[in-house]
Image (cartoon, rainbow, N blue to C red):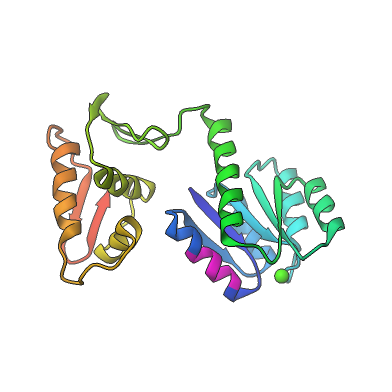
Amino acid sequence: MRILIVEDEIKLARLVKEVLEEELYQVELAFEGETGLDMALSGSFDLLILDIMLPGMSGLEICQELRQEKCNVPVLILTARDAVPDRVEGLDAGADDYLTKPFSFEELLARVRALSRRRLHAEDVGNPVLKLADLEVNLETHRVRRGGKLIDLTAKEYFLLEYLIRNAGRVLNRDQIISKVWKYDFDASSNVVDIYIHYLRNKIDGNSSTKLIQTLRGTGYSLRVD
Ligand code: CA
């Protein structure tokens, strides 16, 4: 799930990015309108969070432009407090939802979840499955299959695999994996990641000639087809 935030309050943008990354979303930032529009049009995002008042081009203009280009990505608009006309204009411009500043992160996350569910259902009704080669991870049921065969994972192994497949192709270092999957600090010398990768590798790659879990010496791990 990739999210683009277009917001010129840099501190707020970075804070929201951190909060979303805690929830395993991948987040990119743009600080002004035109850059935001270009990035959004690249089509590689599943959700956009647009502030209205931006240098260059407003959030509403970005939204209108995207809809004109037949880009249907869900859009969450951030509006100034009590600016009722903004909300109406936002929905008119083709936004899917709006959030009034200042907002709580719980509220933001709830909106993001609702919009991403809508997205999943629109794309692949009731079947939110991420695939890499013959590996399938169902984000709703947490069932994992390799070559059609069901694989039994512990909760931790599942969340590690989900993080890897959401970031398929990227190299993830141990610190990133610990902070996303374990969410609290382990001793820097802890080899918990290596141990769990070992478990996961036995279960996922053990019986297959195509190895998906790659070790990059001194760097970290990556889930990919080489
Ligand atoms: Ca602004």
Front residue of 8 and 55: 8
Q: Residue at x 34, y 45 (%)?
A: 162
Residue farthest toward the right in the current orientation of the protein:
85
Q: Residue at x 64, y 45 (%)?
A: 74
What is the number of callouts on the image? 0
Front residue of 52 and 58: 52
Find residue 139 and report its horizontal and vertical position in percent.
40, 37
Quadrant for residue 219, please give it.
bottom left
Q: Determine if residue 6 is in view.
A: yes
Q: Residue at x 17, y 59 (%)?
A: 192
Up-down: is 172 above or below 93? below
Up-down: is 186 above or below 207? below
Q: Majority secondary structure of the magenta segment?
A: helix
In this rendering, position of residue 204 left or right of residue 15: left
Quadrant showing the C terminus: top left
Find residue 99 and report its horizontal and vertical position in percent.
70, 56
Quadrant of picture, ligand 1: bottom right
Quadrant for residue 107, please give it.
bottom right
Q: Residue at x 53, y 36 (%)?
A: 120
Is residue 40 in the magenta section? Answer: no
Find residue 11 and report its horizontal and vertical position in percent.
58, 75
- Give, as a single range, the part of the protein colored magenta: 12-18
Q: Determine if residue 147 is in view.
A: no
Find residue 73 and report its horizontal and vertical position in percent.
62, 44
Residue farthest toward the top in the current orientation of the protein:
148
